[in-house]
Image (cartoon, helix red, strand yellow):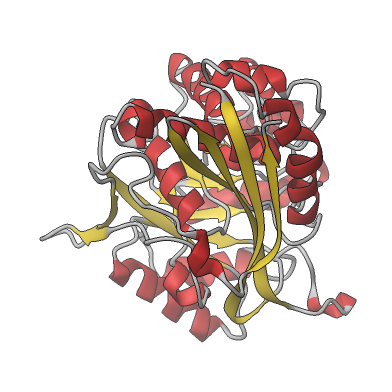
Amino acid sequence: MIVECIDAYLIELPFREPFLPETVPYSEGWIPWSSLKTVVVRICTRGGVGWGEASPGNGPLLGPEWCGATFACIRDWMAPRLVGRDIADAAQLQGLLAAIKGHRYARAALDMAWWDLQSRTKKQPLHQLLQAKTTRIPLGGWLDRMASQEDFLAEIAAAFQAGYSRVGLKLRPGWDLAMLNAVRQEYPTENIIADLEGALGLHHMDTLYRLDDFGLRLVEQPLPPEDLVGHAMVQETLRTPICLDESITTPELADMALELRSGKYVNINVGRVGGFTPAIAIYDACHAACTPNYLGLNLQSSIGTRASLALAGRANFSYPADFWDLSRILTADLTEPVPLEKEGQSGVLHACLTDAVGLGAEPKPDDWKGLICDAAHVQRQ
């Protein structure tokens, strides 16, 4: 199909409460953010449209990419390479963008939009095109440091009461082993995971060994992303499974991690790896290696959330997917939220993938007035 035009939107979604990225300590004088920035793209052909989203963060703090650069890269470099081309499939789209280095979130938004376009053209749900085996996705939430331990424990209780199948805890200096001990005393058998976000090194082995004392389902990214050998060494000595997250940015790195046995789980974040096309390649490699996956999800609007959860219906996603309750975090959204449903007796919360075509929702830019801070229209000449 020939791409007639691509629209890109840089959008600000107000937070209900000021937000500071977990990687930035208040002591450094950073001002909390009042809104979330995200980038939405629309690919248009004569056969229809497709939507995608990229949300790497307001600044280069969670990684080297951020929304301002993602928007500029799509507007100035990627969209002009695609508009006017007769593109047969997502692999060809990725090939046309291969000359541009990095900027995986930008290519993810375009790749996601192409898959949405294809599913709409074929009049089928996106999850069906992505070969999902289930339409009910169990969910997990994340909690970070709070003002008091009592507030923290109460939030854990609220998360499990809401139906989350697991709760992830962000570990920070001074908010690690003592906190885990308090959590396990209060919730001795609940499904708990911990995320270290690459904060430790091999010289912290005493701390890493202590993690085995808390019956964690897994520990995510204990060492820096590039240290796949170190992760393999640590996993060999820990009972607690390691899940690789920030380490997995390309299919090639996933293959290397699987060969080294750097972890027993792999988190697949569609934005971080560059879209559904590389995400499926990583998934296939993990499936062949009998290494289970779970879906990582950045904070973003319901456009990207719906798309990412469609992938989580695949069989090897055997652990609850990340999920953010946007109604509690943001004052506005860009389309209808993902339908949620609690299972009768168990009370387990699921995201429900519907039979509607594509994402299962129809974004309407005319409703985004006051939220768009920049926009670009790249059309066929």
Q: Nearer the viewer, residue 208 or 268?
A: 268
Q: Between residue 250 and residue 41, name the one nearer to us.
A: 41
Specify whether 352 is left or right of 377: left
Viewport quadrant of the C terminus: top right
Residue placed farthest to the front in the image?
381
Q: Which residue, as the protein is rendered here, is positioned at the far right?
A: 28
Residue 320 lies, with reference to residue 162, above or below; the image says: above
Residue 126's x, y, as percent?
36, 35
> What percent of the width, then of the height, locates residue 90?
54, 22
Closest to the observer, 344 or 136: 136
Residue 6 location (% of width, % of height): 62, 40
The answer to which quarter of the image holds residue 42 is top right
Residue 294 or 218: which is nearer the viewer? 294
Give me the residue at 62% from left, 63% from top: 177
Q: Is residue 215 visible?
A: no
Above or below: residue 368 compared with residue 54 = below
Residue 205's quadrant in the figure? top right
User: Where in the figure is residue 179, as x and y percent of width and height?
Assistant: 58, 70
